[in-house]
Amino acid sequence: MRLVLRETLNAFRRAPLLSALSITTIAFSLFVFGLFGLVAVNLRRAIGSVAERVEVVAYLKRGTSLETITVASADIEAFPEVERVAHVSELEALARARRDLTEFQDIFQDLEANPLPASLEVRLKPPFRDATHVAEVARRLRSFAFVDDVRYGRDWVEKLDRLRNIAGAVGTVVGAAFALVAIIIIGTTIRMAVLQRSREIAIMRLVGATDRFIRMPFLLEGLVKGTLGGVLAVGLSLGAWALINSALIRAAFFSPAQAALGIVAGGLLGFVGSALAVGRHLRSV
């Protein structure tokens, strides 16, 4: 292992310009992937913020006692999908309508009786804010005898589901394409280093070196270059994010875990690209 480490360090010393070019090429290929990642992160966050508005509203029959509502609220909060339940009384519903529907102020002022029913607003947990789970919660709410009607905006929730699925599919396909391009670029970059040392590899073969022994320094070199390229790519992504955040729109950056995952991915891509390049060369000599 010590010999492998020494050979890896010697490869950087023998060709510092080529090593710097390799790291820079890897960094820019991962940077493009990182920009797509930033778009995906912010799109997911935007969809998540819209999904926070998903709720099921159960309108109650008039005359339902507060005790019944309190007991039912506790039962509903015990549903595995439910995050919280809020009781909106008839007076609170009228106050909301007067505050939010200013164009109907004259009508609300002339009311002799409150026409708005009390309701239970049911907010779901993030993993359950989709059409299937929302419909299931609505079905269970309808089974309560004191519930007059249940609304949750089915069409809107289904459209949100479709948008989430489309974003996920596009993200997977485009992300896989960028990853494939990164592997090809990294493999080509590492192959340049392999070709530069092709004579050395041939001599090592003549003196009896095994393919594994020959591969190890190149694999470690690819891992190191990929990791360094990943670090540089995260730095470039941070600079691009700061520029976008100050000049265009407020956007979110990767979490520390996501940034660390990007660096690890760079190392793995470097390792895989190196393995492909070295394996191809060893088969040809």
Image (spheres, rainbow, N blue to C red):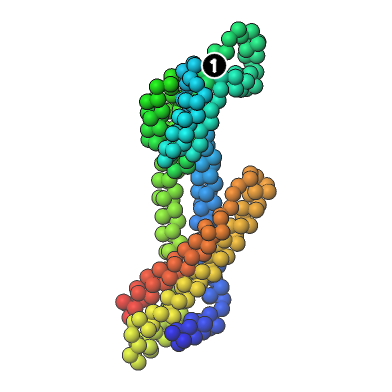
**In terms of secondary structure, where does tag 1 sit?**
loop
Compared to residue 30, the image places residue 12 above or below, namely below
- Res. 207 image quadrant: bottom left
Residue nearer the viewer, 18 or 273: 273
Q: Is residue 109 left or right of residue 224?
A: right
Q: Residue at x 41, y 50 (%)?
A: 172
State the image coordinates of residue 24 (x, y, percent, origin top left). Answer: 55, 67
State the image coordinates of residue 180 (x, y, percent, origin top left). Answer: 41, 59
For the C terminus, give its image quadrant.
bottom left
State the image coordinates of residue 151 (x, y, percent, origin top left). Answer: 45, 25
For the N terminus, give its image quadrant.
bottom left
Q: Residue at x 56, y 62 (%)?
A: 233
State the image coordinates of residue 38 (x, y, percent, origin top left). Answer: 54, 51
Q: Residue at x 50, y 45 (%)?
A: 44
Residue farthest toward the right in the current orientation of the protein: 246
Specify few, some or many for label 1: CA neighbours under 10 Å numbering under 14, 14-19, or 20 or more: some
Q: Residue at x 68, y 48 (%)?
A: 246
Residue 174 shows in this picture: yes
| Amino acid type indicated by mark 1 | Leu
Compared to residue 227, the image places residue 148 above or below, namely above
Residue farthest toward the bottom in the current orientation of the protein: 207
Look at mark 1 in the image and give the residue it sits on. Answer: 116
